[in-house]
Image: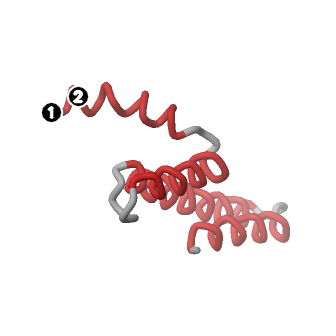
Amino acid sequence: LQIWFFHILGYYILWHYANNLFGVILAGLCHVIAQGQASWTQHDYGHSALCKKPIHNRYVQGLFLGFIKGASPEWWARARTPWALHAC
């Protein structure tokens, strides 16, 4: 819920204060906060850490990655797997 709030707040600030440098920076900060929250949330769903059934975690991860982050869960799995194997 807070992810959507920060995205909407960022767009609202940008819409009303786009001619002010402080407004643009504040709107950008709201979007950075929302993207950071979405990244960690999809990361937790990717590890099947929040829902009881792993398939539900994958659906929610797809929602966060597809609609908020603009990527796919398959991309995340491919990009993360080499790093996870190297870190162990």
Query: Dot 2: what SS?
Result: helix
Q: Residue at x 39, y 59 (%)?
A: 53
Mark identifier at residue 47? none
Q: Quadrant of residue 72?
A: top right
With 73 as the anchor, is 77 left or right in this view? left
The relative height of residue 7 versus residue 75 in the rendered view (above or below) is below
x and y percent of residue 36 in the render? 49, 56
Q: Which residue is drawn at 33% across and 30% down?
A: 81
Q: Which residue is drawn at 84% across and 71% down?
A: 16
For badge 1, the amino acid type reads Cys
Which residue is outermost to the left?
A: 88
Q: How is the image coloured?
A: secondary structure
Assess whether mark 1 and mark 2 are in contact (beta carbons under 8 angstroms).
yes
The relative height of residue 15 versus residue 63 in the rendered view (above or below) is below
In the picture of the structure, the residue carrying the numbered disc 2 is: 85
With 72 as the anchor, is 41 left or right in this view? left
Separation of marks 2 and 1 at Cα, in angstroms: 6 Å
Return the residue nearer the eye: 87 or 31: 87
Query: Dot 1: what SS?
Result: loop
In the picture of the structure, the residue carrying the numbered disc 1 is: 88
x and y percent of residue 76 in the render? 46, 36
Return the residue nearer the eye: 57 or 29: 57
For badge 2, the amino acid type reads Leu
Return the residue nearer the eye: 4 or 22: 4
